[in-house]
Amino acid sequence: MAKVKVIDLSLCQGCRGCQVACKQWNQLPAVTQEEGLNMGSYENPPDLSAKTWNLVRFHEFLNSDGSVQFTFFPDACRHCPEPFCMQYCPVEGAITKDPDTGAVVIHSELCGDCCGECVAQCPYGIPKLETSMDDDGAVTTYYRAYKCKLCNDRVTSNVGGDNTVAAGQDQTALGVLPSTAIEAVPACAKTCPAGAIQFIDESLLTNTNTYPGTGYSAQWILNRSAEDLGLTPATMADAQPKKTEPQDRRSALAGLLKPLGIGMLKDDKRKG
Amino acid sequence: MTNHWVDMKNTDVAMIIGSNAAENHPMSFKWLQEGRKNRGTKIIAVDPRVTRTSAVSDLYAPIRSGTDIAFVNGIINYALTRSRYNYDYIRYYTNGSLLINAGYNFDPSTGFFSGFSGSGTTGTGSYDKSTWAYQTDEQTGADGAVTSGSDVFTAAGATFSTDLIGRKMSIISGANTGTFTIEGATATTLTLTGYAPTSTETGLDWVLPGIPIKDLTMSDPNCVFNIMKDHYSRYTPEIVEKITGCPADKFLHVAELYTSTGQSDKCGTILYAMGTTQHTYGTQNVRTYAILQLLMGNTGLSGGGINALRGESNVQGSTDMALLFHILPGYLKTPRASNTTLGLDTATGNDIVYNQDQYDPAFMGLTTALQDEAKASFLWKWTPQNNDPQSANWWQHSPKYMISLLKAFYGDAATAANDFCYDHLGKIDDATNYSHMSIFDKINDGTITGLICWGQNPAVGGPSAGFERRAMAKLDWMVCVDLWATDTSVFWDHAKDASGNDVDPADIDTEVWQLPAAGSYEKEGSVVNSGRWAQWRYKAVDPPGEAKDDAWIVSELVLALQANPGTAYPAAITDLSWPCYSAGDDHVDVDQVAMEINGEYVDGSGPVKNFVGLAADGTTTSGNWLYCGQINQADGRNRLKDRDNTNAQDVSGIGLYSEWSWCWPINRRIIYNRASLRPDTQEPWDPYRAVILVDQDPTSGTYKKPIAGDIPDGGWVTDPTAGNAYRHPFIMKPEGHSRLFGMGRADGPLTEHYEPMESPLSSSIVNPREFTPAVHIYGGEQGEFSDSAQYPIIATTYRVTEHWQAGCMTRSIPWLCEMMPYMFIEMSYELAGEKGIVSGDEVIIDNVRGEIRAYAIVTHRFKPFYLNGSDQPTHQIGMPWHFGPSGLATGDSANILTPHVGDCNTRIPEYKAFLCNVTKA
């Protein structure tokens, strides 16, 4: 049975436990002050990158009655059922989808001198190319893409599986997640104190078509009615796909993407 | 906490005030969300700004920092004027129905409770609390009569009744003196148990020791409930708005929702943290929550209680083990200088064996000097007396706990003949405070010349950190025990003088030693969480390099001192029993420490079962009576290691998990749980959230007693009409009733709003005071405060999820530093507009104590307050206090700006409300 990661955004309290757990499990280096961090926002690092695969985005919104909403969105790969990145990746086997866990995995070591097609195709802006910065602050981009692997290594090896609950016990009363065929869960789900991030059987999804017509990935977001959640428009925008159709850009990109090409975008964010 | 983390899922309404629980205690929301899902729990967030907690709450109310009392007093007034409270709970279980001395009053025209020594709107002083007392039914007479051989006592003109049965009666003159239990009574006669005078006598002096007078109809004008109605009537929604800045309609939403838990089958919880306590009236802030919870009938119940979210994983444990100067382990009192002896044998006048009955003929036969000495002795002074047979008065047992503690401290050296080495304990001066700020005051004036900073970083975490850093330079030596070099251990590397100029490290003579310590996962032992659960934690990895665990370090220190105990008082050190570590050991035997804390029989017959088994005669030891029972007597098992989550003792699914770890006292998961039963039927207030169940007591045949569920606060029968088989539920108070009226506090028995020391207002609005009258103001620069004309902006400090306390751990971890990399302040768009500041700008924040720099986060989550009816905004900013000069994420310390003044009772520093100015850098 395929699994899906669902996030109930009404439960997310923005603690960023998932963000740091992701770094820890995947042993990703921290972004340093020199590499560029926000000074007027809680949201740090400024964006997803080859070394930041899960990033909690913060938004606030002033309602017309003067009340303020403060909402959070743990942004990471949605692990689409029919991922555009995988469809359009030109290297056989560089992007795979695990039918058991649902994980869409970029095998970055296979990217080689490649194209960045996955970056261009992703409706959510998730995969990022590896970059480096020299002492003068100049950025070099390499054609190896990175993103969340849904901790597929952890999950398939059953690391951190919740074995403390004996068979036959009332798991709901104990406050643990619903029983799953694979007991291990991604690090983000394991660490989430509010139970906002869950890793469940696809069959347990109750709301698989939040965005009619897309046919993919929407269920990842909420597993609840979007309207119920009282999210700020900006957080809804974070959660939604930026496009619903893939683009065949291979010919256009071929001329654009050279090893000296894309610099790392530095958003000048001014968000609470 | 009276309750525990899991129990939050059982609440109907959670009010989070003085806490940013979602941010600093994320786990709390695991259980609150469970409650939301399963029972529709509503969450109220009260805070100066919209926080991560407010973001996931149902209702948010803004209040200016330092105005919790006005806000909650307003809720209390709302409840009292609309009868939204639990009437039976109040009159049976609280002191609402008890009568107070007619001399007590509060004068709103001065802001003083009765008995204040000072005057004016800015004078300070202290209270004579003699009128903050119960009226009692004590009777005395000089015309008692007895007949030889009879057990009947008569006294013309006296009014006795059968209510006196079970009480004590003393005959203090004549040939047949003594204290006797009353077993029968008429209007004029008392039948005394075991009394058979050998002569017939008249004109006897006699005393019937009193108990508080109770008016179950709560109609007497001097009963606490009516005193409260009067006191709190001033806190109308309009006044609440004027003081707190919370719009009255928003306040009323909160008041209506929270007081819905006054219905007997509803229950609300209050979660608080340092936003509550770190004020000059922090204790009173907690008091006002407690009073509200008692009016609602929420304490002792599942889903209720007063729940302090502790700021460190083991801060509950460290408090239990007497981290603070005024207590010994288990909240026993630290001896005062006036407590010259442990106790006095009233029969012989010799030391030891205490006797608190001042009408005991043996005591009355002593000379006045010996009587005075007896009353000043430790055990008499700190053991509360009670004459009500229906009150358990649990602290009456403290002599057993104290003497068992001395036996644990000093082992075989402690004997009855030497007062169990009582003299070895350091005595504190009666009226002197020894807490954090007082220590730095004494470092500053040269009294204290050496300092051990053990897991503490006052250069960042101390109030008026600039003052405290300068004081450190006056030390001869300092030892820092920590995982990293802290901002404190390298204070000399970033020192500044009072004018803010750099100081050359070569000019600082303080010798600093750094001892590398092991982290939580590099050592074995117990950690006690906010819910009092003591959980065993095993060592996962060895500490790096030369780092050692704290127990090893302190043991080596003790052994070194024992080898060279000096000449001042060597016995206090050499007599110390230290069985769990020997020189050269790799580590302390922590299982043996657990046994020592639990307590054993001195004759070698094993662990004591629980504190009921402790004795005052030197036959038992116990390092902390509250933890007596953590070792299972039957099999010697350390129950802190228990991990059975079958929840078998839970009678209604409230999540007790009694076999998962162990909690004090005696594994009682919800304390004061006898109050979870209705006084009339003794059924749970809400049968679906039963904490304990009762059934017919086979002994009495009539009354009920606890039979299942959580460990009850005593197994006595639960029917208040059961006479002396019954005990009131609040067993830790001498009168057995929880205190709406709290006579023990230094600054008032009821809660009254006063402004912070630094305030934009010139009076407290409900009274003319500028600040709380009983505050202590230190001398010199510590007594200088920021003026609101020059510094009109209110500031507060807080924590963020990503950093930990003074930051020496988290500011060394790259993954955390990247999430919160810089010192910042948060401010409203309105203030930013006035000052020409946008998000990301560097700003200067200053006040009378100094200035700091930070980056600005301009946010809708802060809004200006409109105070005292003014149409002019009063601005507030907020800032994290984690940053300092060391580590990877560096920045100025917010505490450079916080004042060196503290709570009237505890002296916890005022970190949460002070004044400043903000300018663009």
Image (spheres, coloured by chain):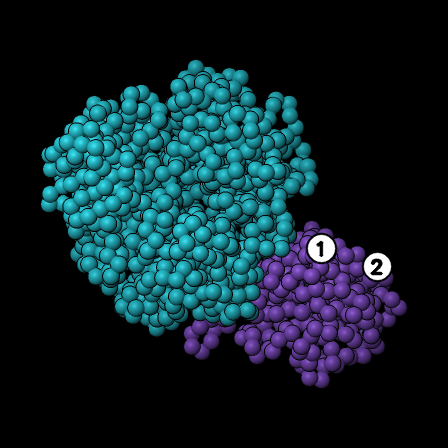
Considering depth in this image, is B208 or B819 the residue closer to the camera?
Answer: B208
Q: Amino acid at mark 1?
A: Asn
Residue B755 in view, yes or no: no
Q: Which chain is cyan?
A: B
Q: Position of residue A119 (x, y in %)?
A: 75, 69
Question: Along the horizontal axis of the image, is B374 left or right of B204?
Answer: right
Identify the disc placed on residue A26: none
Read off the residue under disc 2: A109
Q: Colour of chain A?
A: purple
Q: Which residue is the extreme one toward the top?
A: B567
Residue A163: numbered disc: 1
Q: Residue furthest bottom?
A: A213
- Expressed as whole percent of the image width and height from the top left, the position of residue B69 reads 33, 58
Q: Residue at x 26, y 56 (%)?
A: B97
Please say whether residue B90 is visible from this viewpoint.
yes
- Residue kind at label 2, given as amino acid type: Glu
Q: Chain of mark 1?
A: A
